[in-house]
């Protein structure tokens, strides 16, 4: 009985892994140009069009402004 239960669990796990792989490959094959969509904010051209940039790059810009003499208290840097 336990042997049958273990075999069933193993087969179920294998089928779930294969199903997940099939879904990912299907998205890759049926997507435009065979690429996944760009989800990174800094590299997404649609986000750039509407002026949204990466928070990491915003922090770097603010840090550089605060280190130099060009710090503007009216800028969006800081809290």
Image (tube, rainbow, N blue to C red):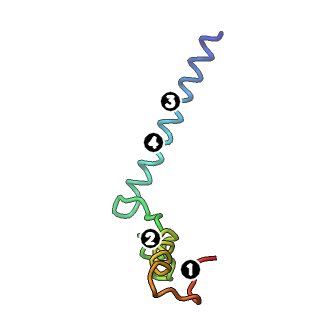
Q: Which residue is mark 3?
A: 14
Give the SS element for disc 2.
helix
Say which residue label 1 marks: 77
Location of the N terminus (image quadrant): top right
- Sequence-wise first label, 3 or 2: 3
**Residue closer to the observer: 52 or 64:** 64
Q: CA distance from mark 4 to mark 2?
A: 28 Å
Numbered label tally? 4
Cα–Cα gap, marks 1 and 2: 18 Å
Sequence order check, earlier mark of 4 and 3: 3
Mark 3, secondary structure of its residue:
helix
In the picture provided, is 74 more to the left or to the right than 47?
right
Residue at (35% x, 58% y) in the render: 34
Camera-side mark, 3 or 2: 2
Quick one: label 1 or label 2, which is nearer the N terminus?
A: 2
Q: Which residue is mark 2?
A: 42
Element class at badge 1: loop
Which is closer to the viewer, label 1 or label 3?
A: 1
**26 versus 69 height, above or below:** above
Picture residue at 41% right of the left edge, 70% below the top: 43
Q: Position of residue 7 (x, y in %)?
A: 56, 18
Residue designated by label 4? 21
Q: Is residue 34 above or below residue 21?
A: below
Residue 23, position as x, y percentages in the image? 48, 47
Q: CA distance from mark 1 to mark 3?
A: 50 Å
- Asked whether the residues under the numbered discs 1 and 2 touch, taking CB atoms below 8 Å apart as contact, a structural biologist would say no
Contact? badges 3 and 2 (CB < 8 Å): no
């Amino acid at each position: 009985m336990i042997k049958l239960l273990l075999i069933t669990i193993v087969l179920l796990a294998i089928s779930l892994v294969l199903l997940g792989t099939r879904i990912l490959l299907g998205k890759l094959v049926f997507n435009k140009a065979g690429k996944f969509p760009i989800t990174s904010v800094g590299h997404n051209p649609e986000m750039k069009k509407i002026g949204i940039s990466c928070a990491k790059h915003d922090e770097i810009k603010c840090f550089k402004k605060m280190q130099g003499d060009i710090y503007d208290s009216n800028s969006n840097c800081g809290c």
